Image (cartoon, grey):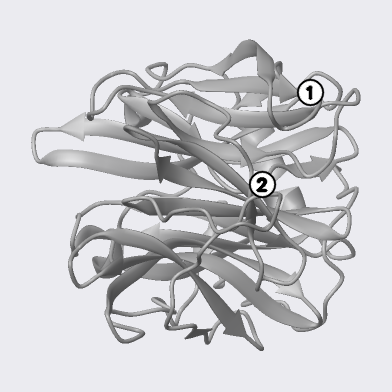
């Protein structure tokens, strides 16, 4: 079976055993949603968020849609990875010289990437249109923002948690400005986080109905001894609107532009009421995964209905077996 190369070692990781007789690869936390509406003054909804372990507890960067409906990024703290408290002030950035960077019009859908002794934050930013931004932090108090890596329009940027072949590697989803059939996963390389190139197509939409419209990377890729486990989201257009589901692929360890296994089935699709009813119905959107190296347990954070933050669980053995058994 696949083994985690580098995961989290923590006894307080959120976990709930799989319900007896449950046969699907991922199961929902029975106390979902873990973050409900209006969790902090001035913020209407918190979803599509990225907690990570930090100093024996948990911290993260969260998408908070304010009461004016504009999304910004907030820091949240938790002792157990389930109950979060949020800082009232949104994140403000400085450049590499320590000078304040002007706030952009919006920021949303962050990922937090543990990398050596610091963290990268990657999110969708306003740069004359939505595109990917990158920042770095050691303490979640000071956030240093780098030059914008890609032109608009691009979303769902996810850095790998280490260099591969001496290069930083980023998954992203180039797109246009709307919900059109323009959303495939690409990979790009950089030696310095400034100049990006060697763009390669990783995964196209449309091979399965549940991701016929768009497909994008989710949480930080999980390094296994035989590849990279990547949770994805896929979008389908139905007669009643869009549906966002969770899927997964396994990429080659040394050449992650190569897909080894692509699961033809979704792993989870909107079924619970907090996923099918909300600000944007029928959406589940994974953005962070905690992995226990010893047990292979995975706690998957996802946004539901663009309204709540929720948790689901699986194990490396269970999900990898499902991907391989149902691979295209």
Q: Are marks 1 and 2 in contact (CB under 8 Å)?
A: no
Is residue 216 visible in this depiction of the protein?
yes
* Mark 1 or mark 2: whose residue is earlier in sequence: 2
The image quarter in which residue 153 lies: top left
> Does residue 268 appear to the left or right of 37 in the view shown?
right
Give the secondary structure at mark 1.
loop
Check the image and report above or below for 198 versus 13. Answer: above
Q: State the residue at coordinates (50%, 67%).
A: 91
Q: Residue furthest left?
A: 239
Q: State the residue at coordinates (90%, 22%).
A: 165
Within 10 angstroms of label 2, few (less than 14), some, or many (20 or more) residues?
Answer: many
Decide which of 36, 140 is in the foreground and name it: 140
> Does residue 255 appear to the left or right of 52 in the view shown?
right
Eye-nearest disc, 1 or 2: 2
Q: Position of residue 214 (x, y in %)?
A: 36, 27
Q: Which mark is residue 210?
A: none
Q: State the residue at coordinates (87%, 70%).
A: 9
Q: State the residue at coordinates (68%, 58%).
A: 98
Check the image and report above or below for 274 versus 30. Answer: above
The image quarter in which residue 309 lies: bottom left
Q: Which mark is residue 252?
A: 1
Q: Quarter of the image containing the C terminus? A: top right
Q: Position of residue 117 (x, y in %)?
A: 87, 60
Q: Which mark is residue 220?
A: 2
Give how far apart the Cα atoms at labels 1 and 2 are.
15 Å
């Amino acid at each position: 079976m696949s083994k985690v190369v580098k995961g989290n070692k923590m006894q307080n990781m959120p976990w709930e055993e799989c319900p007896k007789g449950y046969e699907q690869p991922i199961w929902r936390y029975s106390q979902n949603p873990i973050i409900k509406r209006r969790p902090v003054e001035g913020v209407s909804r918190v979803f599509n968020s990225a907690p990570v372990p930090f100093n024996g507890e948990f911290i993260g960067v969260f998408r908070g849609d304010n009461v004016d409906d504009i999304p910004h990024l907030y820091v949240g703290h938790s002792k157990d990875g389930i109950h979060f408290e949020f800082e009232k002030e949104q994140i403000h950035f400085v450049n590499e010289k320590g000078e304040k960077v002007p706030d952009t019009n919006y920021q949303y859908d962050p990922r937090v990437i543990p990398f050596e002794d610091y963290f990268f934050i990657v999110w969708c930013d306003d740069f004359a249109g939505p595109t990917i931004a990158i920042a770095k932090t050691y303490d979640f108090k000071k956030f240093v923002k780098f030059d914008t890596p890609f032109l608009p329009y691009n979303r769902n940027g996810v850095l790998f948690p280490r260099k591969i072949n001496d290069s930083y590697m980023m998954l992203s989803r180039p797109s246009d400005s709307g919900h059109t059939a323009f959303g495939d996963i690409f990979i790009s390389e950089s030696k310095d986080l400034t100049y990006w190139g060697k763009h390669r197509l990783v995964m196209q939409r449309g091979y399965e109905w549940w991701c016929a419209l768009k497909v994008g990377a989710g949480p930080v890729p999980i390094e296994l001894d035989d590849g990279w486990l990547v949770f994805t989201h896929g979008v389908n257009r139905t007669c009643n609107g869009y549906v966002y589901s969770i899927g997964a692929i396994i990429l080659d360890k040394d050449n992650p532009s190569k897909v080894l296994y692509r699961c033809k089935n979704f792993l989870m699709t909107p079924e619970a009421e907090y996923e099918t009813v909300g600000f944007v119905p029928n959406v589940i959107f994974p953005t962070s995964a905690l992995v226990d190296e010893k047990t292979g347990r995975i706690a998957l954070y996802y946004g539901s209905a663009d309204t709540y933050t929720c948790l689901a669980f699986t194990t490396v053995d269970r999900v990898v077996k499902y991907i391989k058994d149902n691979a295209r």
